[in-house]
Amino acid sequence: MEFIVIVIGVLLLRRMGTLSGLQQDDWYRSWVARLASFRWLKSRPHIRLPFTLFTPVLLLLLLVVLLGGAWFGIPLLFVSFLVFLYSLGRENLTEQIEGYRDDLTRDDLQAAYHAAAEFNPAKKEGSAENWEELHQEVLCAVSYRYFERYFAVIFWFVLAGAPGALLYRLLVLHAEMPLEEPETDTERETGTVKRWLYFMEWLPVRLVGLLFAFVGNFTACLESWRSSFLAGSASTLQVMGGYVAAALQPGLKASESATEGATEREAEITEMEALLSRVLIFLLCMVAFWVMLI
């Protein structure tokens, strides 16, 4: 059943681009704000944060246990499907990539800065000073967006079911929330969330790195994977960016000899999209194999 849920969910998101009708996050923001309004919790972030994140997850876990095998597992399958859809990535990544690609075609650096900010979870423009630096930031950011959109959610759904996928998405949402009171407990709480998110992403991103080796440059990807495995301080975004750069090495060299400037960067974006799609298909095949084994 898990495999059916995953395949249908992934196909729906890829077909529709966004599931904004289902992925309504106002309830979680209201929940966070309500808990922060309680004085005894506001002064105890070490209690408030676990309570904020784990209460919805534990309630879902209780529902999963109660449903169990009732009605041949159909209610449980339906709940798991809805939670999986909710846990997948936000916004229309394809449209954002197309917007950036249009800016490349027009050679409009200023517009590209604004388009690139959409790939950043904080919606902030990067520190790039020219096309090359900006383009590298975009490649890394898009690869991470693909990871948190599909790969990490699938990993935790397979490993821990709907509660695991929901916990991952809530951590991402919490980490992306704007800070209203910097230099306070809120800022420290956000730092804690980002550390928890890093630990939840550490294993899946390195497993995904092995898949890159099978669909891209095997030698370069394996070397990048070995480096990332030992690089404890590297962020998930940096690790994913390294995998993509390594996997695309032959393609990038071919592009450099055939095209220049904006056309070359467009080719890199196209190659990266195709690479990430191949990795996703490979991951689904691995999930199917795992389901058959168990």
Image (cartoon, rainbow, N blue to C red):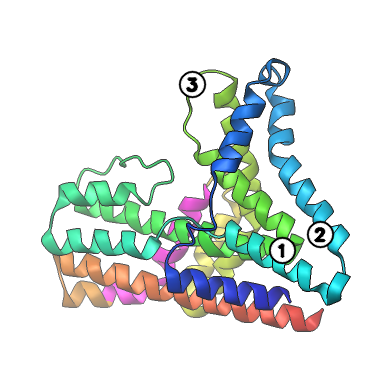
- Residue 189 as seen in the image, left or right of residue 139: right
The magenta segment is: 235-253
Amino acid beneath label 1: Val
Would you call the spot at circle 2 few (<14 residues within 10 Å), some (14-19), or many (20 or more)? Answer: some
How far apart in space, not on screen, are marks 2 and 1 (Cα)? 8 Å
Amino acid beneath label 2: Val
Q: Nearer the viewer, residue 11 or 142?
A: 11
Quadrant that contains the C terminus: bottom right
Q: Tell me the quarter of the picture where residue 161 sits.
A: bottom right
- Residue 213 as seen in the image, left or right of residue 117: right
| Element carrying mark 3 | loop
Q: Nearer the viewer, residue 150 or 238?
A: 150
Amino acid beneath label 3: Pro
Which callout, 3 or 2, points at the residue further toward the start of the chain? 2
- Residue 58 as seen in the image, left or right of residue 192: right
Q: Is any atom of residue 102 visible in this view?
A: yes
How far apart in space, not on screen, are marks 3 and 1 (Cα)? 38 Å
CB-based contact (under 8 Å), mark 2 and mark 1? yes
Kindly identify which numbered label has been placed on residue 64: 2
Residue 241 belongs to the span the image colors magenta: yes
Which callout, 3 or 1, points at the residue further toward the start of the chain? 1
Counting every numbered tag in the picture gives 3
How far apart in space, not on screen, are marks 3 and 2 (Cα)? 38 Å
Q: Position of residue 281 (x, y in %)?
A: 53, 79
Quadrant that contains the N terminus: bottom right
For mark 3, what is the residue?
Answer: 182
For mark 1, what is the residue?
Answer: 79
